[in-house]
């Protein structure tokens, strides 16, 4: 396919480009935290494009922020650029790898409505189907504690179905759910439909185990319609319960638990791991925050299919997409290495 | 909607039920749906509404689908076939 699917991810939200004068233009309101310039990516060597074995996304010729009608050029050798970008070419252009970080430091003190202009070139062809990133991220399934990892998967075009992808839980409720094989999940007697959140949507709540988004953001005034939504939501929970149990039993996915707050300790990781093992052999990646820059993006194998990943920050507003991707790639290398071994 | 008494699943009948469920979970009419209609072309259908459709169809037909096939659903016909094969009419391709 020829479409590079160039877009920005800003705080977990996808921003589409407008094409204007050979540039892709993205509307923004600054400050907006870290952004990431996303696109499909392929290796030219795999699509008949020569010997280049690099994973190439989009070749950037110029990067310009227009604020108050004034252009502010961002030099492509800016020291804040690097994550998700290949080395600068002799032509002065720079390829992304499909997920280039655009840190806040690039935009200085600029504030208010702005436009990001990106030029210039996509690959002539991208591999059909899943990109490497999407295929990588689709090997994982979230166990919570919230939707951050689901957003990471979406940013890389991976949309696997999973019970806890759009759910909130914590280690205690997760362990209880796994130990009980989520018994009674989707039973109307244990479930309620809540209208909550900011921005609000309907959520299915089983107080024993989890709270789950429905992504229905329109408040219903008809009780009969709410009853239909509730019945459909309960049926969805029952189906997803069977799916997660089958995925763990069949080791179909690498499960990810994002551990924050009181859950960010080795005891919690071992508790989740033991509960998972009660069902099946699927690998478990626990991800926790680290203050040590050298540990960011690394993964340790703790034995028996338990892995510990380190990330710089957790945030649904400023997701560390590239670090999550590195952690996933490192985990897959360990898991596959152990499988082969 | 009434449950079927027999287990023989005619594709046209299964399709009619699936469309009816799709209209229920999306709370809007879904005209012109055929077996080849891509799921991502349906009005108001995201992955969660799709799961609800499969789950309610399972319960209507009294079958349990192989959950390993859920990630591969691309067309309305895939849901119909999932129901048929889960009802004992061979393996889901």
Image (cartoon, rainbow, N blue to C red):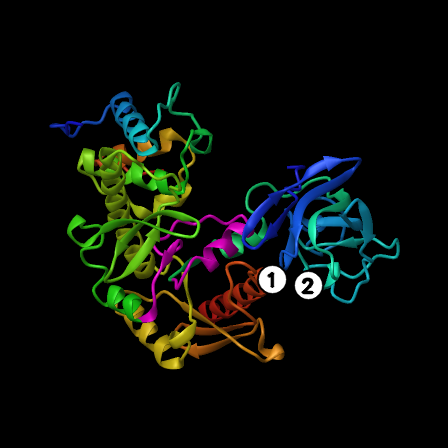
Look at the numbered disc 1 and give the secondary structure of its residue: helix
Judged left or right of residue A80, residue A153 is: left
Q: Residue B51 sits in which quadrant?
A: top left
**Residue shown at 82%/48% (left/top)?**
A71
Question: Residue A41 versus residue A217: which sits nearer the camera?
Answer: A217
Residue A229: image tag? none
The residue wearing badge 2 is A83
Residues at badges 2 and 1 in contact (C-beta under 8 Å)?
A: yes
Q: Chain of mark 2?
A: A
Nearer-the-camera pick, A107 or B87: A107
Q: Quadrant of residue B91?
A: top left
Which residue in the rendered view is the most extreme toward the right? A91
Q: Is residue A140 left or right of residue B17?
A: right
Q: Quadrant of the N terminus of chain A?
A: top right
Give the prevailing secondary structure in the magenta stretch: loop
Q: Which residue is mark 1?
A: A322
Residue A303 falls within the magenta-colored stretch = no
Provide residue A84's location: percent of width, then percent of height.
68, 59
Q: Which residues are magenta?
A: A144-171
Earlier in the chain: of badge 2 and badge 1, it is 2
Relative horizontal placement of residue A2, taking residue A262 as reference (left or right): right
Q: Residue shown at 68%/61% (left/top)? A: A104
For mark 2, give the secondary structure: loop
> Is residue B27 placed above or below A112 in the rendered structure?
above
Residue B14: x %, y % from top left: 26, 26
Judging from the image, mark 1 belongs to the subunit labelled A
State the residue in front, A33 or B85.
Answer: A33
């Amino acid at each position: 396919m020829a479409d590079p699917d160039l877009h920005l991810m800003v705080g977990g939200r996808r921003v589409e480009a407008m094409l204007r004068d050979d540039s892709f233009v993205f509307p923004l309101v600054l400050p907006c935290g870290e952004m990431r310039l996303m696109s499909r990516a392929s290796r030219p060597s795999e699509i008949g494009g020569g010997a280049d074995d690099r994973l190439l996304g989009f070749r950037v010729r110029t990067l310009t922020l227009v604020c108050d009608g004034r252009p502010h050029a961002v030099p492509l050798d800016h020291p804040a650029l690097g994550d998700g970008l290949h080395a600068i070419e002799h032509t002065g252009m720079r390829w992304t790898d499909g997920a280039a970080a655009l840190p806040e430091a690039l935009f200085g003190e600029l504030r208010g409505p702005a436009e990001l202009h990106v030029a210039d070139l996509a690959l002539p062809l991208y591999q059909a189907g899943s990109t490497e990133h999407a295929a990588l991220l689709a090997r994982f399934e979230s166990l919570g504690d919230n939707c951050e990892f689901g957003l990471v998967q979406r940013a890389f075009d991976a949309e696997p179905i999973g019970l806890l992808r759009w759910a909130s839980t914590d280690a205690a409720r997760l362990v209880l759910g796994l130990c009980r094989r989520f018994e009674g999940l989707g039973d109307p007697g244990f479930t309620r439909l809540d209208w909550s959140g900011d921005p609000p949507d309907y959520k299915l709540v089983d107080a024993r185990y989890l709270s789950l988004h429905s992504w229905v953001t329109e408040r219903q005034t008809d009780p009969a319609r709410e009853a239909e939504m509730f019945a459909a939501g309960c049926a969805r929970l029952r189906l997803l319960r069977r799916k997660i149990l089958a995925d763990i039993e069949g080791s179909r996915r690498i499960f990810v638990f994002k551990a924050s707050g009181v859950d960010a300790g080795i005891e919690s990781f071992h508790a989740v791991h033991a509960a998972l093992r009660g069902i099946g052999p699927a690998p478990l990646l626990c991800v926790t925050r680290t203050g040590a820059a050298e540990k960011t993006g690394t993964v340790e194998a703790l034995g028996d299919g338990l892995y510990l990943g380190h990330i710089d920050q957790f945030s649904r507003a400023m997701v560390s997409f590239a670090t999550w991707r590195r952690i996933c790639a490192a985990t897959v290398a360990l898991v596959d290495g152990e499988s082969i071994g | 909607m009434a449950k079927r008494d027999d287990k023989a699943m005619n594709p046209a009948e299964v399709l009619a039920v699936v469309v009816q469920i799709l209209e229920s979970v999306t709370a809007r009419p879904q005209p012109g749906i055929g077996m080849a209609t891509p799921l991502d072309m349906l009005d108001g259908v995201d992955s969660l509404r799709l799961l609800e459709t499969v789950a309610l169809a399972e319960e209507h037909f009294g079958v349990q689908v192989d959950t390993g096939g859920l990630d591969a659903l691309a067309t309305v016909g895939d849901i119909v076939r999932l129901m048929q094969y889960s009802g004992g009419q061979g393996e889901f391709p």
